[in-house]
Image (cartoon, rainbow, N blue to C red):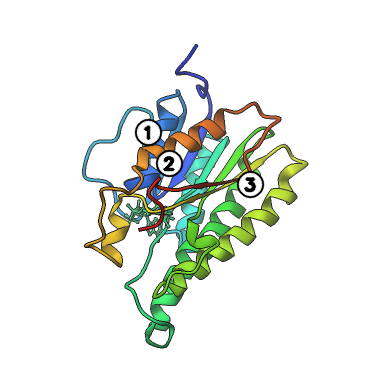
């Protein structure tokens, strides 16, 4: 039945409370998937049907273990993992970039992604899918964004190794590299950025959903999705 292709499946979307993660979570739930959304803060608004919130800070190993112990007890499996939690940082050239800022961005965007994936793999059956939401900053350099670009470049390398490691287990691994998308993350480094030509989070979600719904013997390995106008 259309609209229920993912019924009986369970997904985890880290950072699924707003922005791109929320749009992906809602797209999966719209096809019947049960979706756990995690983040540091509970969203203020009510969650859509089939969405369940769990608190988790991906920088914190104990917090990740607590999330997965709850997931194991309640759902027992994970068919879709969307590593989406991410932060940027105020624009700063390397000599002015605070080491604490560097540590926090790497801990979230790179080490957090590794830790969550490591915890998730034992729950993932054959024909499950891992989606790492990276950025065009995974392949390009943007001045003032050294920690962000380094974290995303590292996460792309991690994703490529992971894809080969789990291929034989029938787990598909997709890297999504969106360009500028209209979300709150821009407030962290360029609040006045022109938003009109940016991608909508729902557009990124549509691409991710299409990739998840492909037959299990096919995988979209990497997608770069840009605003038609190009970079800002
Ligand atoms: N917007 C863009 O232009 C763009 C382009 C390419 C890629 N991306 C990537 O897309 C992903 C989502 O970003 P977004 O644009 O949707 O930004 P966003 O609206 O700021 O959402 C970020 C999400 O990550 C969560 N998060 C942040 N730090 C976390 C932590 N330590 N532990 C757990 N969750 C954490 C946030 O919730 P809490 O703050 O409550 O924890 C929130 O749910 C990021 O990885 C970003 O790098 C964004």
In the image, the residue with mark 2 has its CB under 8 Å from the nearest atom of ligand 1: yes
Find residue 51 and report its horizontal and vertical position in percent.
Answer: 37, 34
Which residue is the site of mark 1? 26
Question: Sequence order check: which comes first, mark 2 or mark 1?
Answer: 1
Residue for point 43% across, 53% down: 179
Query: Residue lying furthest top in this view?
Result: 1
Query: What secondary structure is found at the residue carrying circle 1?
Result: helix
Find residue 85 and report its horizontal and vertical position in percent.
Answer: 43, 54
The foreground one among 230 and 157 is 230
Which residue is the site of mark 2? 204
Side of 163 relative to 83 (left or right): right
Residue 200 seen anywhere in this rendered image of the structure: yes
Side of 188 relative to 13 (left or right): left
In the image, which disc is placed on residue 121?
A: 3
Query: Which callout, 3 or 2, points to the residue nearer the camera?
Result: 2
Q: Specify few, some or many for label 1: CA neighbours under 10 Å numbering under 14, 14-19, or 20 or more.
A: many
Query: Ligand 1 quadrant?
Result: bottom left
């Amino acid at each position: 039945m259309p609209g229920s292709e993912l019924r009986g499946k369970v997904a985890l979307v880290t950072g699924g409370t707003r922005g791109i993660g929320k749009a992906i979570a809602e797209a999966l739930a719209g096809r019947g998937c049960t979706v756990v959304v995690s983040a540091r803060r509970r969203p203020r608004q009510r969650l859509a049907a089939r969405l369940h919130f769990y608190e988790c800070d991906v920088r914190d190993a104990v917090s990740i273990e607590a999330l997965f112990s709850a997931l194991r007890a309640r759902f027992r499996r994970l068919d879709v993992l969307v590593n989406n939690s991410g932060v940027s940082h105020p624009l700063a050239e390397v000599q002015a970039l605070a080491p604490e800022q560097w540590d926090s961005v790497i801990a979230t965007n790179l080490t957090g992604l590794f830790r969550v994936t490591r915890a998730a793999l034992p729950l993932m059956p054959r024909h499950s899918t891992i989606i790492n939401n990276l950025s065009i900053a995974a392949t390009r350099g943007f001045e003032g964004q050294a920690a962000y670009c380094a974290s995303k470049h590292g996460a792309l390398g991690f994703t490529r190794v992971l894809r080969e490691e789990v291929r034989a287990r029938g787990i598909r691994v997709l890297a999504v590299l969106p360009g500028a998308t209209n979300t709150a993350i821009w407030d962290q480094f360029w609040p006045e950025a022109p938003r009109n030509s940016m991608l909508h989070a729902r557009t990124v979600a549509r691409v991710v959903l299409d990739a998840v719904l492909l037959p299990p013997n096919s995988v979209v390995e990497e997608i770069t999705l840009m605003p038609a106008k190009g970079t800002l």
